[in-house]
Amino acid sequence: MLLQHSLVVWIVSLLFATNTNMLCFTPTLNTQQNVLPDVLHSLMTHDDGTQFIDDTVCDLMLLPLLLLLLSCLWYAKSSRSRCMVISELMIVHSVLVVVRGVLINVTTLPSPIHSCLDTSIRPQSYLLTIYCNDQIFSGHTTVNLIAMSAVEFNTVYVSRSIKVIGWLYVVAASIVSIASRDHYTVDVLLAWTHTCGLMWLRRSNFEKYWNDSGVKEDEVEKNGVKVN
């Protein structure tokens, strides 16, 4: 039942975030002269003002950590454990997307994305819609951090070496997000503080759910008592 409730909350939160993202598109703000200065952008940009890395790379860099998280869920101790972890992930992501949906409208910034500048039509990436002015804070970094933090709290199947590689990957993906001018540096840093802070607050829940063997549930079912 908890999983169903979390799913409803998650869907409502995503709808809220999508609508706020669409409202924040401001063509008059997204001009070349309005782009805010960023030290890392200046170091990672061609002479003509274009970025070294295409912004669609950020979309593709979500897949490895999501696959790692899915593998952890596949090898979870029980179906109950798996459902509880998924429920917790949806709650955390719901909170973050709602906070982000509010922030990107009360702190509207000119987009650093080259394809957003001096255009009256919102551009598209290969996988996702680019919401120009969708800045504070980085959604790509948030998703990567949620997935990696959940893997970090799994003390059952994931080795320390895999976790170290995973965190290095998150750092690399964060740098790519800046290098592609998908976000300002501050957007990525805020994603780290917000996401890691919330995940740390929920750490005990994740560790408990990953280690839930479902034995109590099995014993109740054997005794003929209905489990809600």
Image: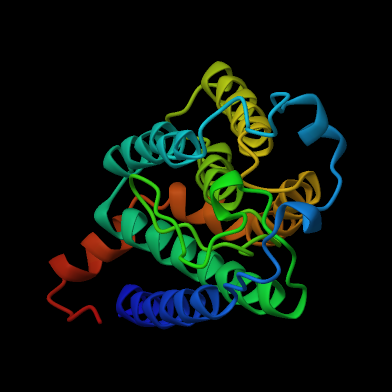
**Colouring used for the render:** rainbow
Exactly how many numbered labels are in the figure? 0
Q: Is residue 167 left or right of residue 214?
A: right
Residue lying at the far top of the rendered structure: 161
Which residue is drawn at the image coordinates 47% and 28% (left, top)? Answer: 158
x, y (%) of residue 49?
Answer: 70, 34
Front in this rendered view, residue 12 or 48: 48
Q: Residue at x 69, y 24 (%)?
A: 46
Q: Residue at x 67, y 60 (%)?
A: 135
Q: Picture coordinates of residue 171 (x, y %)?
A: 67, 30
Which quarter of the picture shows residue 1?
bottom left
Q: Is residue 60 left or right of residue 226?
A: right
Question: At 38% across and 37% down in the image, what residue appears?
Answer: 63
Relative to 216, residue 25 above or below: below
Q: Quadrant of residue 152?
A: top right
Q: Quadrant of the C terminus?
A: bottom left
- Which residue is at the front of the view, 153 or 30? 30
In this rendering, is residue 57 above or below 88? above
Across and down, in percent, residue 99 comes to 66, 74
Viewer-nearest residue: 190 or 74: 190
Residue 8 position in % (x across, y down): 35, 82
